[in-house]
Amino acid sequence: MRHLMNPLDFSTEELDDLFRLADDILLHEERYAHRCDGKILATCFYEPSTRTRLSFESAMLKLGGQVLGFASADSSSAAKGESVSDTIRIISCYADICAIRHPKEGAALVAAQKSRIPVINAGDGGHQHPTQTLTDLMTIHALKGQFSDMTIGLCGDLKFGRTVHSLIEALKRYANVHFIFISPEELRIPGYIREDVLERGHIPFEEVRRLEDVMPKLDILYMTRVQRERFFNEEDYVRLKDYYILNREKMALAKQDMMVLHPLPRVNEISVEVDTDPRAKYFEQVQYGVYVRMALILTLLELI
């Protein structure tokens, strides 16, 4: 039995296989419509989610399976004080595979250690979000055709943004990837990412404050929102929430084949006027997320 806790749980060769499977599902969805007949996915979401939870549910339903679960801690026995380890033992009696999101770092790993079914980390605190990373990689794979020889700008909340941390971990394994981190001082990437991942791996990166200064260099711009739920006080959030806004003027500085990604939801860090720019790929990114989660479910259930 296998779990997905971290993007590095899959080798680059295994990721290639996963994306090939997702590509085939995209082209021949009808072939996979009954692969999960009789199987049940449990979605255990201890914090709010729209895209991730519904993407998992859509993926399982498209495969012919069924879904059960809860959408917040308040609607589960966590409200009564039940531990994650006890909950997953119970869920293991009801379902064949589980996707869990939790505000505490490491909660998904605790679940995996106690589970009798495959567990997928759907986000744990500010730590990791591996299936969003698979979505990001699938989008790059589909639209760029490569992962190496690129300059990638990550902009916004780089301190608490688990999607950013997971993407850095995944892309560090490819050749000639150069990272540019664009953030205010208060939201810089954490020390453990800078020192343990980038510096130790001799991976080139630079840190800047102004998005305009680096737009012409970028092959991919990965925008993120400033997350109110990760802040300890409202004053800091209000001060930083509008620090970066991607608009038509900034897009005019970018390459014609540059690609804008965003894990969503957005607040106002990308102006709606950018949505019609052909380089804006964040809504396509959502669709790719369904196909890659379908491929992941089939892989973990060993149905391929």
Image (cartoon, grey):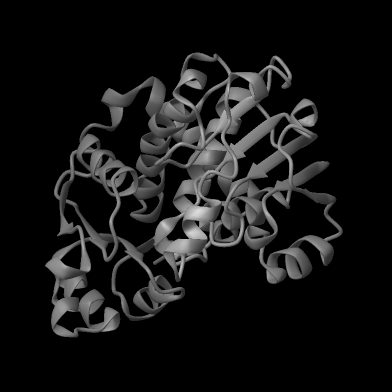
- Where, quadrant-wise, is the N terminus in this rendering? bottom left
- Callout count: 0
Instruction: Out of 193 and 2, give the one closest to the viewer.
Output: 193
- Left or right, 164 with reference to 122: right
Q: Position of residue 161 (x, y in %)?
A: 53, 56
- Left or right, 9 with reference to 98: right
Q: Position of residue 199 (x, y in %)?
A: 83, 64
Vertical arrangement, residue 27 with respect to residue 87, above or below: above
Is any part of residue 129 visible from this angle? no
- Left or right, 230 with reference to 73: right
Instruction: Out of 107 and 60, give the one closest to the viewer.
Output: 107
Is any part of residue 271 visible from this angle? yes
- Left or right, 153 with reference to 233: right
Vertical arrangement, residue 278 with respect to residue 292, above or below: above
- Where, quadrant-wise, is the C terminus in this rendering? top left
Name which residue lies at 80% across and 43% down.
Answer: 178
Vertical arrangement, residue 197 with respect to residue 271, above or below: below
Name which residue lies at 49% across and 27% down.
Answer: 271
Name which residue lies at 42% across and 63% down.
Answer: 234
Q: Position of residue 245 (x, y in %)?
A: 56, 35
Instruction: Out of 62 and 84, give the one closest to the viewer.
Output: 84
Q: Position of residue 259 (x, y in %)?
A: 62, 26
Vertical arrangement, residue 9 with respect to residue 78, above or below: above
